[in-house]
Amino acid sequence: MESLIRRFLHETFDSKYLYIISPWITLFEFERSFIHLPFVETRRIDDVFRAFVFAGIDVRILMRCVDDAIDIELLRLLRLLRKNRGIFQEVFGASRQYIASETLKYIVSHIDSLIKTIKIVNALRDTLGENLRFDIPASEWYQRLHTKLYLNDRSAIIGSANFTRSGILTDGNWECLLHFTKDTKLYEDALKAARSHFDVSKGFDECERATLFLVNRLELLDKPVTGLEELEGYLTELYQEISSTIA
């Protein structure tokens, strides 16, 4: 899986455009350095995206918005616990009696995953501008984005793998991907699908607005936030606070 994606990314440096359409896109590192001189030598996927833009490639990325990654009930519970520091310490501290280790792992991993989601969104916004798009429902009848499609002007990959560590790297999930070249009918259909998704997608401002509306309207935090960067800071503080009580 990783070898196929790496070959596809190398091929993209000789392409005019790149579409990445996936519900989940995260910050991750390759098992070994991704080297395509003179443009990039890195293990970080966001560095590869920046290298594409620097090389003059039209990069277009579509993903679900941050609000879709939020566990509403978990954040609501943590807000209530944070209001009473004594209870917070008792629940998460070394003498905790009310929380199983697997539950604790979920809480910590969810907060960490949410932080990384915001980080990649902000990084891609800085790199791509309006070419970063989001799947935000226009009505209650709209079906959320499920397509996993990676396409340049030479070939396309479609299948079950999200653009995440668990979806792509060799120690991740079991996935199935189909790779086909530009001279096939499948490629024409995939390009139409990519363009169709972009036609109904929304920009960064609408994603940020939808996320802030969710966390502030439902009072998921113990204080309001005014931007995704501020939300990232709040979650980072919460993550460190829980981690320190565990230690």
Image: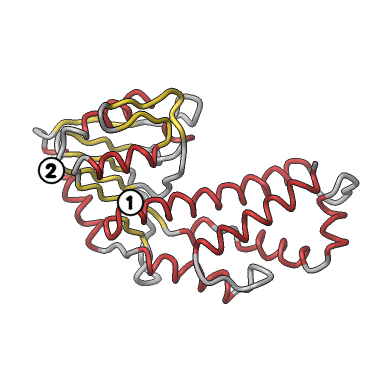
Picture quarter containing residue 50?
top left
**Of helix, strand and loop, which one carries label 1?**
helix
Quick check: 150 above or below 96? above
Residue found at x 53% / y 70%: 214
Taking the image as shown, residue 187 lies to the left or right of residue 126, namely: left
Residue found at x 76% / y 64%: 82
Q: Residues within 10 Å of mark 2 (few under 14, many from 20)?
A: few
Quick check: 12 above or below 65? above
Quick check: 185 above or below 1? below
Give the number of the disc on residue 119. Answer: none
Taking the image as shown, residue 191 lies to the left or right of residue 86, namely: left
Q: Residue 112, image x and y in percent? A: 60, 47
Give the number of the disc on residue 127. Answer: 1
- Callout in the foreground (1, 2): 1
Quick check: 20 above or below 33? below
Q: Residue 197, image x and y in percent? A: 26, 56
Residue 182 or residue 160, whichever sits in front: 182
Residue found at x 25% / y 29%: 38
Amino acid under disc 1: Thr
Amino acid under disc 2: Glu
Give the mark, 1 or 2, whose residue is nearer the N terminus: 1
Residue 157 or residue 6, whichever sits in front: 6
Q: Residue 25, image x and y in percent? A: 42, 46
Quadrant of image for the N terminus: top left
Which residue is identified by label 2?
A: 188
Residue found at x 41% / y 51%: 123
Q: Residue 183, image x and y in percent? A: 9, 33
